[in-house]
Image (cartoon, rainbow, N blue to C red):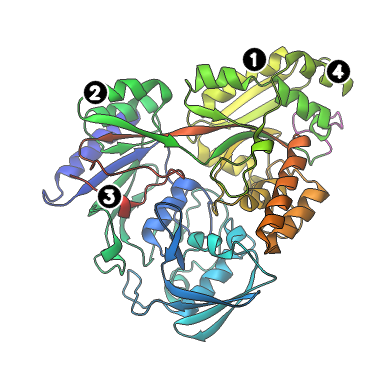
């Protein structure tokens, strides 16, 4: 009810806008984690940064690449990429975008506290040729460097220094200036940000890319509505124009409501469970000196106790794609062989636990978000009795994603034994998933979201090889071998790729389509 009251009060504010302006009111199930370009590597937060900030290279609606701040580029040698910057581009405060701002942004992205450093991990230096020309120098050949650059947001050096934002502060929703303010050069400007309430943007009339813009949104009002029923009610009543994700059980009802419908499609995010495989003693087994998840047989037992088809039918209502892979079809390096999922087998699970020395199971807490993925808490609730039948006593800890991500992540020292997470490779290449989720030792940028600290030396070796391998066939073979080793290790429990579902009003133009990465790029939204 609290969220619904908020929706009503915000609707009043919309009335005050110009009748001619195209105002998009949209909502999802939780607030942004912040606006700092170098922190909170999370889908909705990154999508909002992309509306405010420019990158050197832009990812198009069809996932291809095109010029952004960089108008052209050339590979001078295997380690050096020269880029020319677009002239006469200005930040929202009117100051010009120059090579110095790119150099400053790189230093910030590579900071120890940064959660976005994997996107520039191989870049060791930017050489300034002049104010509008730079060279990115990598530690070795990087076959996916350009694929990384759309997530490298450029911010102004002078403005950051003036507002004391040069340092990166880790943590979701950290009360820093940069998490609540912006000065990008992107297509939209920030008008207001109130945490957990609203984020309001207006179009940047001076954006260089206006000619290429497909949409016509002049003003956008984003607001989180945590309760799914309230969010659906806001759509059906016309208080908002767009919402996501639509709960599986509400798709039919929305489609049967005049003036509303659901746009569906495949999503590239893989949702999975992870284990603490690092500590010698599990957080939930204090005084025992034991961490059962270090034993592969225990991880396999958990995997085989999860009935993914039951989750598919009952929880997701057929709105997911069960998988054995940590990446989805459509991601470069996806392997159909890796995707074959070991079958649900409760008796095998019990046998494995007994062989590992836990015939009566053991206690463990499952950390789960309740406002991030479609039916996230319901999936975790379903897993609890499944594991109980194998003898495992699972205590569910479901909480909002800002608390969840801080708890299981580096900010709180990976304070978890067993957790849920979802991941879309930002580069749409499996190397990104390996670096972020399945390795942890080579570079500081590796393993930022490897919250269970899984590690296998051969996986690390293959990931490092693929990082500089310029032969596409060799590279794909290395990536597949790394994935297969991780799969055979039962390093994580992949669950599914959820079906993407946007609920829209008839105020949205018919040509609007959601993208597989499930972001809201305001330049692509048209209203009637």
Which callout, 2 or 3, points at the residue further toward the start of the chain?
A: 3
Q: CA distance from mark 2 to mark 4?
A: 53 Å
Left or right relative to 182: residue 314? right
- Earlier in the chain: of badge 1 and badge 2, it is 2
**Callout 1: few (<14), some (14-19), or many (20+) C-alpha neighbours within 10 Å?**
some
Which residue matches tag 4? 354
Residue 62 or residue 149, whichever sits in front: 62
Residue 451 on image: x %, y %: 68, 43
* Residue bearing the label numbered 2: 257
Q: Which residue is mark 3?
A: 220
Is 227 part of what is drawn in magenta?
no
Return the residue nearer the eye: 161 or 527.
527
Residue 171 drawn above or below residue 242: below
How much space separates mark 1 and mark 2, taking CA atoms? 36 Å
Residue 403 location, x and y as percent?
55, 39
Q: Is residue 525 left or right of residue 416?
A: left
Q: Secondary structure at mark 2?
A: loop
Of callouts 2 and 4, the N-terminal one = 2
User: Is 282 inside the magenta-drawn segment?
Assistant: yes
Q: Is residue 375 visible?
A: no
Query: Gap in Å between the C-alphas at discs 4 and 1?
Result: 19 Å
Q: Which residues are magenta?
A: 280-290
For label 2, the crowd category at 10 Å Cα-Cα, with few meaning under 14, some 14 to 19 and many 20 or more, is: few
**What is the quadrant of residue 183 in the picture?**
bottom left
**Residue 137 on image: x %, y %:** 62, 75
Q: In the picture shown, does residue 374 fall above or below 99?
A: above
Pointer 1 with pointer 3, Cβ within 8 A: no
- Select label 2 or label 3 by which is in front: 2
The residue that mark 1 highlights is 385
- Compare marks 3 and 4 and give the one earlier in the sequence: 3
């Amino acid at each position: 009810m609290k969220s619904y009251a908020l929706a009503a009060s915000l609707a009043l504010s919309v009335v005050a806008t110009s009748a001619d302006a195209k105002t998009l009111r949209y909502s999802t199930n939780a607030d942004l984690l912040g606006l700092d370009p170098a922190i909170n590597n999370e889908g909705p937060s990154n999508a909002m940064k992309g509306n405010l900030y420019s990158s050197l290279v832009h990812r198009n609606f069809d996932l291809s690449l095109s010029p952004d701040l960089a108008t052209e580029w050339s590979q001078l040698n295997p380690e050096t990429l020269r880029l020319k910057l677009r002239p006469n581009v200005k930040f929202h405060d009117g100051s010009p975008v120059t090579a110095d701002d790119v150099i400053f942004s790189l230093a910030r992205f590579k900071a120890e506290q940064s959660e976005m450093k994997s996107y520039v991990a191989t870049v060791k230096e930017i050489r300034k040729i002049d104010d509008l020309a730079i060279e990115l120098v990598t530690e070795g050949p990087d076959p996916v460097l350009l694929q990384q650059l759309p997530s490298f947001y450029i911010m102004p050096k002078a403005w950051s220094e003036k507002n004391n934002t040069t340092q990166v502060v880790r943590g979701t929703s950290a009360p820093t200036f940069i998490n609540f303010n912006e000065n990008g050069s992107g297509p939209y400007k920030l008008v207001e940000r109130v945490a957990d309430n609203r984020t309001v943007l207006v179009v940047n009339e001076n954006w260089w890319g206006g000619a290429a813009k497909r949409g016509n949104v002049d003003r956008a009002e984003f607001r989180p509505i945590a309760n799914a029923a309230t969010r659906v009610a806001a759509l059906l009543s016309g208080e908002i124009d767009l919402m996501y994700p639509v709960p599986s059980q509400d798709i039919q009802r929305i489609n049967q409501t005049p003036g509303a419908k659901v746009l569906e499609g495949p999503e590239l995010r893989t949702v999975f469970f992870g284990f603490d495989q690092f500590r010698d003693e599990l957080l939930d087994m204090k005084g025992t000196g034991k961490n059962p998840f270090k034993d592969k047989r225990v991880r396999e037992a958990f995997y085989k106790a999860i009935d993914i088809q039951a989750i598919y039918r009952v929880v997701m209502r057929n709105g997911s794609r069960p998988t054995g892979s940590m990446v989805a079809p459509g991601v470069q390096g996806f392997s159909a062989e890796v995707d074959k999922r070991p079958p649900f087998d409760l008796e095998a699970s019990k046998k494995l636990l007994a062989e590992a020395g836990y015939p009566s199971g053991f206690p463990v807490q499952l950390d789960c978000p309740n406002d991030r993925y479609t039916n996230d808490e319901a999936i975790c609730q379903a897993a609890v009795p499944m594991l109980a039948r194998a003898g495992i006593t699972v205590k569910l800890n479901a909480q909002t994603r800002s608390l969840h991500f801080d708890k299981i992540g580096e900010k709180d020292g990976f304070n978890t034994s067993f957790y849920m997470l979802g991941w879309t490779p930002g580069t749409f290449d499996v190397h990104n998933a390996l670096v972020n989720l399945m390795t942890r030792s080579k570079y500081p940028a590796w393993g930022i979201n490897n919250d269970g600290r899984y590690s296998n030396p051969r996986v690390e070796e293959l990931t490092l090889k693929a990082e500089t391998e310029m032969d596409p066939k060799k590279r794909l073979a290395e990536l597949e071998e790394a994935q297969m080793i991780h799969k055979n290790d039962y390093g994580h429990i992949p669950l599914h790729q959820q079906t993407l579902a946007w609920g829209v009003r008839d105020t949205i133009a018919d040509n609007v389509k959601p993208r597989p990465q499930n972001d809201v790029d305001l330049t692509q939204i048209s209203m009637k």
